Image (cartoon, helix red, strand yellow):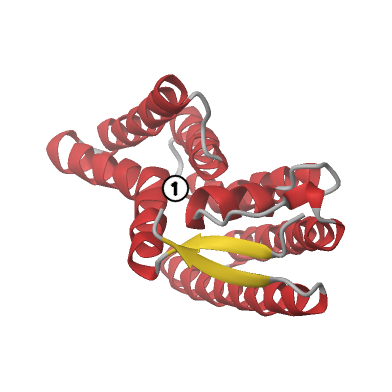
Amino acid sequence: MSDVLRLPRPWRLLRKSAWSLAEAAGLPLGAYLTGNALAGRDAGLLAGLAVAWLIVAARKVIAGQVPGLVMISALVLSVQTVLVFATGQTWIYLLQFPIAKLILSLLFARSAPTEHPLVSRLATEVVSLRHGGAGHPGLHRFFQHATWLWAAIFGLLAIVFAALVATQPIAFFLLVSTAIMIVAIGFGAGASALWFFRVLKRNGMRLSFTGD
């Protein structure tokens, strides 16, 4: 087993991460905004959903597999769109926020005890981290435990968002939920990064930048 984990050089890493996020969120959001501006909310929702699943299909055909972040995004968008068309009511539409977080929590929790926890997959897909995964027990345990951490974060967000939807005006909910989301994701990312480097040090491993 190699004690060196490889990452692309910083510029390539930034470009890879930016494209992964664009596939998962940026392109569907752009399609939604365009459709909404041209033909209204329903057209925007359908356009965003169509782009999300087109990306899934293209990834499957071209690469033979679909990145976890892209698939999660498509599934969450599907749930959101069904909710909107099934109800047409604003307060029920807002339920997409806690429901989306609940889905993410369940997906992370389901994968955590397996040989391929979601954090391990996302580390490979989003930042191109080359690692031994299940081949290195210490690193594998980190990925499993970090996946449980993110399952807990998204589960807590689902509870908080559900309470806010039920008790707060729409404008206040959107403002507060955005702030809470930024803080929670920042905390999770920071905690995961610090934890990761501690695991590397404890197991005598190091990072190396490559040109790939």
Q: How many marks?
A: 1
In this view, the residue in front, 68 or 150, is 68
Q: Residue at x 50, y 32 (%)?
A: 78
Give how far across and how far down residue 52 sits, in percent: 39, 34
In this view, the residue in front, 98 or 61, is 61
Q: Quadrant of residue 144?
A: bottom right
In this view, the residue in front, 62 or 188, is 62
Instruction: State which quarter of the image contains the N terminus.
Output: bottom right
Give how far across and how far down residue 79 sits, in percent: 54, 35
- With respect to residue 29, does 178 lie above or below? below
Q: Residue at x 37, y 25 (%)?
A: 58
Q: Residue at x 42, y 29 (%)?
A: 59
Give how far across and how far down residue 210 sits, in percent: 45, 61
- With respect to residue 8, does 60 lie above or below? above
- State the residue position of label 1: 90
Badge 1 amino acid: Thr
Q: Is residue 75 left or right of residue 3?
A: left
Q: Quadrant of residue 37?
A: top left
Q: Secondary structure at mark 1?
A: helix
Q: Residue at x 67, y 59 (%)?
A: 154
